[in-house]
Image: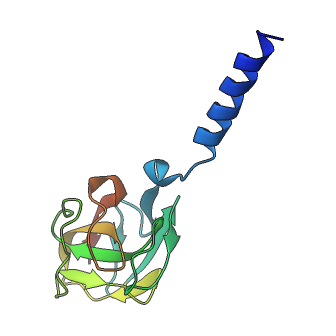
Amino acid sequence: MKIRLPFLVSVLVLLAVSCGPAQSQARVFFVEPADGTTVQSPVHVVMGVEGMQVKPAGEIVEGTGHHHLLIDRGGYAEGEAIPNDEQNRHFGGGQTETELELEPGQHTLTLQFANGAHQSYGERLAASITITVE
């Protein structure tokens, strides 16, 4: 019995830790377009996230956030507020897709997930692709 109790406690602790929030394993990704593709404008962009829930901006709730699409720039540091302008598109309504007008040429698109106050989750919840617009 003495051996079983520590083993049981260890198993329960391991289960509790592994069933906790998956935020550290969360990721964002582009469903469309694929990295390296050649596209026409307007570009249909579909944004994905795993391990977090998409929620409209306005309220900060752990494990939730919304997408930002950054055009021809990298992501933001964790906690940094993302500006709302032509280069930094906000999807504070919880949208997961958009049509994007881009000039012909090569462009880098960065998907950045942020909390309800538009504060970046940082590099761990950012992904970039490069596309060519004809």
Horizontal placement of 107 versus 128: left or right? left
Front residue of 71/123: it is: 123
Which residue does the image show at 58% across and 49% down from the upper left?
A: 20
Horizontal placement of 41 versus 85: left or right? right
Q: Could you tell me residue 118's position as x and y percent? A: 28, 78
Q: Could you tell me residue 111's position as x and y percent? A: 33, 68
Horizontal placement of 10 versus 47: left or right? right
Horizontal placement of 65 versus 73: left or right? right
Which residue does the image show at 33% across and 59% down from the upper left?
A: 127
Front residue of 22/103: it is: 22
* Quarter of the rendering occupied by the N terminus: top right
The number of callouts visible is 0
Coloration of the structure image: rainbow
Which residue does the image show at 78% across and 10% down from the upper left?
A: 2
Q: Could you tell me residue 42's position as x and y percent? A: 34, 88
Q: Could you tell me residue 8's position as x and y percent? A: 75, 24
* Quarter of the rendering occupied by the C terminus: bottom left
Q: Is residue 7 above or below residue 134?
A: above
Q: Is residue 106 above or below residue 126?
A: below
Q: Is residue 8 above or below residue 126?
A: above
Q: Residue furthest right?
A: 1
Which of the 4 image quadrants contains residue 43? bottom left
Which of the 4 image quadrants contains residue 34? bottom left
Front residue of 35/52: it is: 52
Q: Is residue 102 above or below residue 115?
A: below
